[in-house]
Amino acid sequence: EAGVTQFPSHSVIEKGQTVTLRCDPISGHDNLYWYRRVMGKEIKFLLHFVKESKQDESGMPNNRFLAERTGGTYSTLKVQPAELEDSGVYFCASSSDRGGFLDGNTEAFFGQGTRLTVV
Amino acid sequence: RKEVEQDPGPFNVPEGATVAFNCTYSNSASQSFFWYRQDCRKEPKLLMSVYSSGNEDGRFTAQLNRASQYISLLIRDSKLSDSATYLCVVILPPGGYNKLIFGAGTRLAVHP
């Protein structure tokens, strides 16, 4: 079974440009998450979809970031316009249990990430 | 103050050594706890959940101390393949049951 896949693996763009990241979750997983790791910092939550609905977007840094999950399958994360501080690794994850991670038995499966560099 | 604090390391140990990492969390309301492992330039992967009574999985033992608000990971008989960054992760219910809160990680390097 395919894992979580992300595209592109790397992206180098100039400040002010637009970049769109894509995530394909594990088939059948209703939950899809975006996380980000900025250089030297911890991985931080951006947002959570259940199917096509945004459940929690409290981690989105500002309105330059737009996430969509049309049809409840793959998701895109668009950064427009990109700024230097947006550089980092963007991870997507998916999980199957709607109850969340509270019981300790649900695993979040991560993609290999998109390394974004804004110059 | 960070919600999850870890010693960044690196911990440099020889093969066969026993090594332990601690992780402290700031909010006593934190509930579920996990250790994830991340290899260089790879994705995080769940290593093990941490249960209140402590749990063991082969060479790995995880413990939770709610009174002192820390969790630990013990690795016995270290292998070269254990070299990675170990991420402490908690769930803080007011933030939702689906939000993983990560520490910055502890780097382990096992040498021959």
Image (cartoon, grey):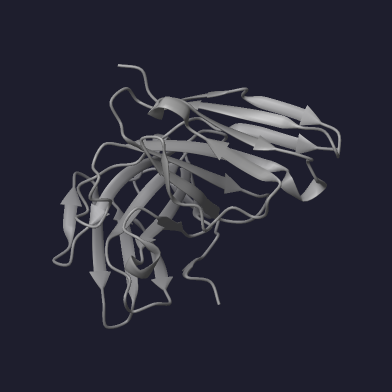
Q: Which of B4 and A19 is in front in this view?
A: A19
Name above or below for residue B32 compared with residue B81: below
Q: Which of A8 and A18 is in front in this view?
A: A18
Name above or below for residue B14 compared with residue A17: below
Q: Which of A49 and B88 is in front in this view?
A: A49
What residue is rendered at 24% in x and 65% in y?
B63
What residue is rendered at 26% in x and 36% in y?
A96
Q: Where is residue B103 in the image (x, y as percent from the top left)?
A: 48, 60
On the image, which quarter does residue A50 sit in? top left
Name above or below for residue A105 compared with residue B63: above
Q: Position of residue A107 (x, y in %)?
A: 29, 42
Name above or below for residue A33 compared with residue A102: above
Residue at far left of view: B53
Q: Where is residue B64 in the image (x, y as percent from the top left)?
A: 25, 68
What residue is rendered at 82% in x and 33% in y?
A17
Q: Nearer the viewer, residue A68 or A60?
A: A68
What residue is rendered at 38% in x and 23% in y?
A3
Q: How many marks?
A: 0
On the image, which quarter does residue A29 sit in? top left
Residue at far bottom of view: B67
Asked if residue B77 can be seen in this view, the reply is no
Is the N terminus of chain B in the top left, top right, bottom left or bottom right quadrant? Answer: bottom right
* Left or right of residue B69, residue A59 in this image: right
Asked if residue A112 can be seen in this view, the reply is yes
Q: Position of residue A35 (x, y in %)?
A: 52, 45
